[in-house]
Amino acid sequence: MRLSRYFLPTLRENPAEAQIVSHRLMLRAGLVRQSAAGIYSWLPLGLKVLRNIEKIVREEQNRAGAIELLMPTIQSADLWRESGRYEAYGKEMLRITDRHEREMLFGPTNEELITAIFRDNVKSYRDLPRNLYHIQWKFRDEVRPRFGVMRGREFLMKDAYSFDLDKEGARKAYEKMFVAYLRTYARMGLKAIPMAADTGPIGGDMSHEFIILAETGESAVFCHKDLVDYDILGTKVDFEASLTPIIERWTGLYAATDEKHDAARFAAEVPAEKQISARGIEVGHIFYFGTKYSKPMGAVVAGPNGESIELEMGSYGIGVSRLMGAIIEASHDEGGIVWPESVAPFKVGLINLKAGDATVDAAAAKLYAALEAAGVETLYDDTDERAGAKFATMDLIGLPWQVHVGPRGLAKGVVEVKNRKTGERAEVALDDVVARFTAA
Amino acid sequence: MRLSRYFLPTLRENPAEAQIVSHRLMLRAGLVRQSAAGIYSWLPLGLKVLRNIEKIVREEQNRAGAIELLMPTIQSADLWRESGRYEAYGKEMLRITDRHEREMLFGPTNEELITAIFRDNVKSYRDLPRNLYHIQWKFRDEVRPRFGVMRGREFLMKDAYSFDLDKEGARKAYEKMFVAYLRTYARMGLKAIPMAADTGPIGGDMSHEFIILAETGESAVFCHKDLVDYDILGTKVDFEASLTPIIERWTGLYAATDEKHDAARFAAEVPAEKQISARGIEVGHIFYFGTKYSKPMGAVVAGPNGESIELEMGSYGIGVSRLMGAIIEASHDEGGIVWPESVAPFKVGLINLKAGDATVDAAAAKLYAALEAAGVETLYDDTDERAGAKFATMDLIGLPWQVHVGPRGLAKGVVEVKNRKTGERAEVALDDVVARFTAA
């Protein structure tokens, strides 16, 4: 993409309304703009990152055997009356009346709707187990939206729902999502720690939040220090085999959110020098809740002998749009954002240091064409800004690699390649640049 | 995907509530389920088709130089007061009051929001022209939703917005979208005819609807028969060159929707035997409306001499979810849907004719693995249904190719390959099956 034809409005100054670094950088780097309290438009660069995050989430859900569908944003209030949650949910639910005076709502979560779909379409034990998920915009009418996309009102969430015939099956489904979540965050360069958590308005018997330690986090959390150093799961996890050993390893050490924290147990189980008491960002939350929805909603299937089986369920959420803020909180420096390659909007930022100079223009344009042809996503700054401003913008938006093309280097047949994260710079011969970014 | 692990609830009988064939087939083939009046959940098979349609729309928007972003579904009423449309829009707009008693709405279209984004972020003539688009769920509170996704309330729309410095630039932007639309529909196997159209609540000076002729269409349309036979634009359209000749060819013959129809002109301009008076499905609508939004909303940029320039705008919509219905209306037979390959949810439906037979199971599983490894998206019916029911389901869901694996063929080392559209069948040696679907 040529910057001269793109839509990338960056800001030099820190916006006054942004209190945390991710919010400041998302505004300054032209990723989002607020259009109403807690409601954001995703500008082109931000949308590309959002899609990359979404893609990783999707791939790991699919790998774990979950099946994607898509439920609508607007739901009928009657559906929520079946579970008893319509009155219980409180003011966070955005309630709507349509032109025929029917009560509707903008879905804050989808347990009722997916249970209704499953109930109406699946009749036999032979069609279980299943895990169905979607990635859809949700709305929660937060009383005080803040921290940019970290606590917005309209936000993108992946929510999966598992259906099993018995508790043992439901436990396996829970374990699959637990492991899929560990892999998902790891692929984005995040260390997310599963912690025993409260079930809140979803309800249920067992729950974990996935927490990224960060000073700007909204939750107080407590855990054993060794969890922070646990290595990340490779791609070779076999989801058909038992995942219990992995789960036991991660849940064997103390880790709890504020609501579930037991100070006495923490003191007894964790040596003083291993006690972490910190703040964290919740990026995922998983629940096992048995028949909490299937029972009132009559979601049953016929068993092998014709008996009626109430479905055992769980639900599993990842805050997709919030993850963008969390990644920035975890990966930035004084110059701006430092994207992990897996979610970066472009891999390379190509800077023409002297736009208007025929030699530099030609060399940069040729390099840009070669990178694009090789499938290396490149943002080409072909504008006539000063070099200093271009460097600052490129650092701000945080692409993993920069290529600087200028007259001095070209005289020697080289360009400068900069690693955004380490700051390391190298002179690279013009003909070797593409290979540098395509080598496996 | 193995059918035994998928979520594909098909129906044998025609649902009573569906009046038109696309609606019937979308329910029967397990593509969608209604969750409230005019509001649908997209089941896994339907979602795959929806994403394929969306991908074609996106590729053609990008090819024409439009840039993708994403605006939220919920907008502030104040924004719509700036343009004067908040009161004018009527009951189709879903109006919402949030917990702080602020007036909000679920966006039925986005002229106001994109104009505000552009106004707040672009200050100089040097940053024009631009065309920004998004693909987002919209809501229009239809008084009588019907025909499935053809006239739903929550629907997926691609809407693009062009910003130019003068009328001539705006005309070029309009022409680019006009041509991009012709290509978009053609890639889905649809013949969409651009017709002079009323501007309705969007307003403006020039407008075309893109119409697919179909008996079940909701609009009466009138056009010259030759337009139906016009060939489709190849991929070699140069969007940097003048597109006027293409536009003149398509607009040179009479074509108008009901609201714009002039019976006298029709009779005078079109020979009787060339007069088509038919019904049509609107799948796109483009508008040029000049400064209708930029003027009241103060969307101006500084010109080369510091003068203030009011932006010339157009907007361009494609009904992405409606297109699924339109494609089915145009492509089905008595057995069910016949997907064009470009939007098919899977390319191949692999049928195991004798599940439980070790030889057949092994051969089918091996073929399935080989197809998937070669990147051929395959739905493998590994269930223990009867062969007849499997054939019927596979015809119903309309994958372009079927591969039938049974004991009789395997004894000869062959399988049967069936083309869903033509019904043509061929015996193919087991080792040649994959190559048949991967050859360029």
Image (cartoon, coloured by chain):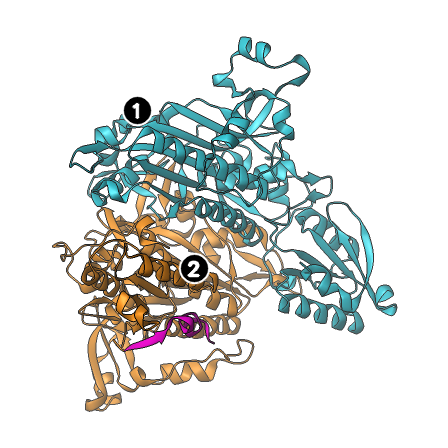
Chain colours: A cyan, B orange
Place of residue B222 in the rendered image (x, y in percent of width and height, measured from the top left): 23, 78
Place of residue A96 in the rendered image (x, y in percent of width and height, measured from the top left): 29, 38
Q: Is residue A50 magenta?
A: no
Question: What amino acid is at disc 1?
Answer: Ala
Label 2: chain?
B
Nearer the observer: mark 2 or 1; the answer is: 2
Total of numbered circles in the picture? 2
Place of residue B295 in the rendered image (x, y in percent of width and height, measured from the top left): 48, 57
Question: What amino acid is at disc 2?
Answer: Ala
Q: Residue at x 51, y 74 (%)?
A: B168
Looking at the rendering, the stretch of residues picked out in magenta corresponds to: B425-440
Tell me the quarter of the image containing the C terminus of chain A. bottom right
Q: Secondary structure at mark 2?
A: helix
Disc 1: which residue: A88
Q: Is residue B438 magenta?
A: yes
Disc 2: which residue: B369
Label 1: chain?
A
Figure quadrant of residue B397? bottom left
Of A214 and A222, the residue lying toward us: A222
Q: Is residue B403 left or right of residue B118?
A: left
- Asked if A392 appears above or below B212 in the picture, the reply is above
